[in-house]
Amino acid sequence: MPKELDAAFTLAKNVVDTQFENLSSEVIEATKKDILDTLGTCIGGSTAAAAKEVVDLGREWGGKPECTIVSYGDRMPCYMGAFINGTMAHALDYDDTHDKAVLHVGPAVVSTAFAIAEREGGVTGKEFITAVALGADLICRMGLATKRSIHEGGFLFTPLYGYFGAAATASKILALDEGKVVNAFGIAYAQASGNVQVNIDDESALTKRLQVGFAAKGGIMSALLSQKGLTGAQNSMEGRFGLFNLYQRGEYDRSVLLRGLGEEFEISNLSFKPYPCCRLIHPYIDAALQLKRDYQIKTDDIETVVVNVNAEPHPLCHPLDLRRRPQDVVFAQFSIPYAVAVALTYGKVLISNFTLPALKDEAVLNVSQKVTPKYDPSLSTREVATPPIPVEILLKDGTNLRSKIVVHPKGHPENPMSFDDLVEKFKDCVSHSAEPLKNPNIEKAIGLCSHLEDVKDVSQIIRLLARSRKSMYLNYYDFIP
């Protein structure tokens, strides 16, 4: 029997064949929301650890001014710009999530799309939406098709599959043919990586956020190298040593990877985060906020807080002492005890709660010491909350409180954040910008994102969201208001 073509060929054909007209209104709206949300988290992340450092490195290297660095305003080669913007967009852990696939798409895909669009010039909103929707869909499909959990295989799906999504997005904007997209996937595979060691046990490595930037950079380089005629492994996904056989030990579902391709787009199933921390924590925050709201709980009255979690030792609760009293921001972003304590203390969870000064807030730490995980091996290790789990609080007077079941945490497509909700989130992120941004520019950028399909050149959007630097790059900023 003839050998079945590697999935890379089918996916490459889909990248080439799919046009804006193939996208439903639902997909278009979801894509526009993701673009706005990613730009917001990128601006907010411009003051996070690692942001200034990678910007400084880019400044040291210099190079052709092709791509705008959000907030800072520097212009750098597109691969470096995508790396920096992608890193900043993921830094707060406030970016989009596909709850079932357990990954993020915006930092790798949207940063890549803007970098290539600026490099090429004249990329329309329709072209941009199509490229982002395709890249996001590919990342999500790869995650959904993978049967091994992140903590079983050891690879974070966001950066690992982000290389391929970024390559697809860049290839679409560059209008590569099928053969070159296949090569771009092969070149992406030569770089693809991203480990979970960065934020388990007692680790809190800043490479957690850098890995996504690497994926954006790698995807861009893959597409540009392929455009130049370089080749990559043709059977990059299902070959003998292809991605799924080598990295995932053959534990994947090909039908999930390809089913409904070109007709169903997983970007419609993205969740958007109302809280700046790991999405797996959000059901617990929703439950804690519900209890706080319904019973007007005072933290001094709390005896214990029990959170039901899967698979001991749970990475968001272990080591417990460190998760209860995180020593740096990354630990806090991946701590159920800390986030639940913030929710119970203040009745809200904001960017400002995940800063170094906030980690010394004794009001929060007094509560986090009372949060105890209850391990339940029957709970899924793949989805955010399956089956749904409650939070239980015992008060000092002996009262037992049990939260409502959180089926879909806030931001899920079944419990969505509206475009207006994301605008408010965007503006909060802007308040944390490394460089001051003009209010008229902010409003104009929001308006352009909301009507993105009518925009003639998307480059103007990202340039509105960066401080004008009138030095060697003066000519590139002449048109900025």
Image (tube, rainbow, N blue to C red):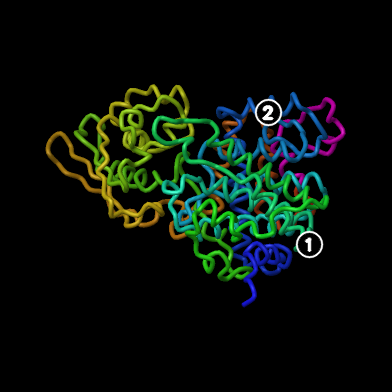
Residue 155 horizontal side relative to residue 72, left or right: left
Identify whether 210 is placed above or below 245.
above
Residue under label 1, please give it. 177
SS class, disc 1:
loop
- Crowdedness near tag 1: few (<14), some (14–19) or many (≥20) residues, C-alpha within 10 Å: some
Q: Amino acid at mark 2?
A: Val
Q: Relative to the observer, which residue lies in front, 372 or 237?
A: 237
- Magenta residue check for 466: yes
Left or right of residue 328: residue 449: right
Q: Amino acid at mark 1?
A: Asp
Q: Is residue 227 magenta-colored? A: no
Q: Nearer the viewer, residue 251 or 46?
A: 251
Residue 462: image tag = none
Check disc 2 and report its element: helix, strand or loop.
helix
Residue at image point 58% right, 64% down: 265
Residue at screen point 72% across, 55% down? 128
> Which residue sits furthest left?
398
Residue wearing tag 2: 55
Residues under labels 2 and 1: Cα distance? 34 Å
Residue 23, by quadrant, is bottom right
Residue at 51% x, 39% y: name it.
Answer: 93
Classify mark 2: residues with Cα within 10 Å, few (<14), some (14-19) or many (20+): many
Position of 306 compared to 383: left or right?
left
Question: Looking at the rendering, in which quadrant would you find the N terminus?
Answer: bottom right
> Which percent across, then down, holds residue 159?
57, 45
In the rendered image, residue 245, in percent from the top left (x then y), is placed at: 54, 57
Across and down, in percent, residue 356 comes to 46, 24
Q: Which residues are magenta?
A: 459-481
Q: Quadrant of the C terminus?
A: top right
